Amino acid sequence: MRLNTILAGIAISLLLLLALPAAASDYTLGVFGNANEDDTINMQDVTYTELIILEYRDKTELSDAKYDGKINMQDVTQIELVILGKEKELTLIDTADRIVTIPKPIERVVAAGLLDDVRIVIQLGATDKLVGINNYAKRYALKPSDYWSPIREAAPELKDLPDVGGYTNPNTKIILSLKPDVVFEYGRIPDVANAIQENTGIPVVCISNSQLDLGVYRIAGMILGEEERVEELISYADEEIDKVTDVTSDISEDEKPRVYCISGCGGESAITKTWGRYDPINIAGGINVAEEYVIGSGSSIVSKEQIIAWNPDTILIHGVSPPHSISIDDVLADPDLQTVNAVKNRNVNYTKGYMIGWDPATGLTECFYMAKLFHPDEFEDLDEEEEGNEILETFYGVEDLYTEMLDLSDRYRWE
């Protein structure tokens, strides 16, 4: 009875405050204990859960902090432990919508999925927790110096880590031998993640980035105990985007170039393979002509007739280091595209693009690069190389990474 009285006092004193909706956010932190389902876990979630117990609030999916099917004071205690960083385990929803319970603290990590997970671990300053990496990451850690690889520069020690196999066919025996607390896998192949977990008994969390949305960094930060670093990166990324959109938001739609982005893959479909979503184009004040046509964030093949109908003002080709599977000259010489504005005006350039997954750090640099390409007068005073170096140093901790990329590429460069 005394406990109920205390809870009632706390709840009633905050009832007016909590009658208002939680702060608006585009991102919901998928961790059980995030009772009010905003982008963080804090004392508001404690109060929200207390109000659920007292039946002043309806139960939410994430209010079951202990993930035991009940809402009681144990959930309040769990939330308080999470806030203090003293929880013994954490239940979360990963990027493949899988519910996973992990032990805490996490000291040993195997990154089994493409490069998104490895990049995030490096950028959060937790490279020392990696005990094994997938063969893609291993390959990029060993790339020669004539190939641009920020992970090689930021974490050269990765070359000495065990290779746990490919992201679609990891070697579970090697993973078991490394005794990780958690395994990261690529977010688009949940069946592989489930198989690893079933065969090893080790929790597997799917990690993958989506354009310039750094929401997954919050999940990774809570797993790795790097929440403060995550918030620093998110705030910094928002500020950088604002530098561009403060200008491009005032540009009218008819002044924005229509942009077609080639995915950069070779073969017969080289020119006709594109992305329906490419955030830097929009942020930089361009119009992605394929955005409404191509469904999903992956690449899709369109027809040349469609490209001609779109009549883009600018064509961008994914790629950094030559030789390119499709070049600027290939596009300019294509006989079917001679009526397209971008070809007639020779407005075809390379851009960084995806590289085995999506890196928000290089995506941010593209916002400045594209802004200066699309709107040279508005961004005349922009030192795009300086901005790029600052962004990559903030994420990777290495100076002049962007300059190195420019030196190794034939991408457009302002003098």
Image (cartoon, rainbow, N blue to C red):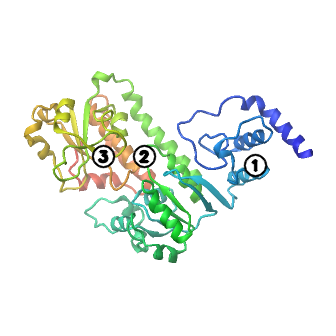
Q: Is residue 181 above or below residue 403?
A: below
- Secondary element under disc 3, as helix, strand or loop, is strand
Mark 3–mark 1 Cα distance, whole angstroms, equals 44 Å
Amino acid on which the number 2 mark rests in the picture: Ser
Q: Position of residue 318 (x, y in %)?
A: 26, 48
How packed mark 2 is, by other alpha carbons closer than 10 Å (few <14, some 14-19, many 20 or more), is some
Q: For residue 137, say whether it is visible.
A: yes
Which residue is more in the foreground, 397 or 345?
Answer: 345
Q: Is residue 263 left or right of residue 244?
A: left
Amino acid on which the number 3 mark rests in the picture: Ser
Which residue is more in the foreground, 390 or 288?
Answer: 288
How packed mark 3 is, by other alpha carbons closer than 10 Å (few <14, some 14-19, many 20 or more), is some
Name the residue tied to disc 2. Answer: 210
Of labels 3 and 2, earlier in sequence is: 2
Q: Which mark is residue 299?
A: 3
Name the residue tied to disc 1. Answer: 76
- Secondary element under disc 2, as helix, strand or loop, is loop
The quarter in which the C terminus is drawn is top left
Residue in the picture at 30% in, 52% down: 403
Q: For residue 129, say whether it is visible.
A: no
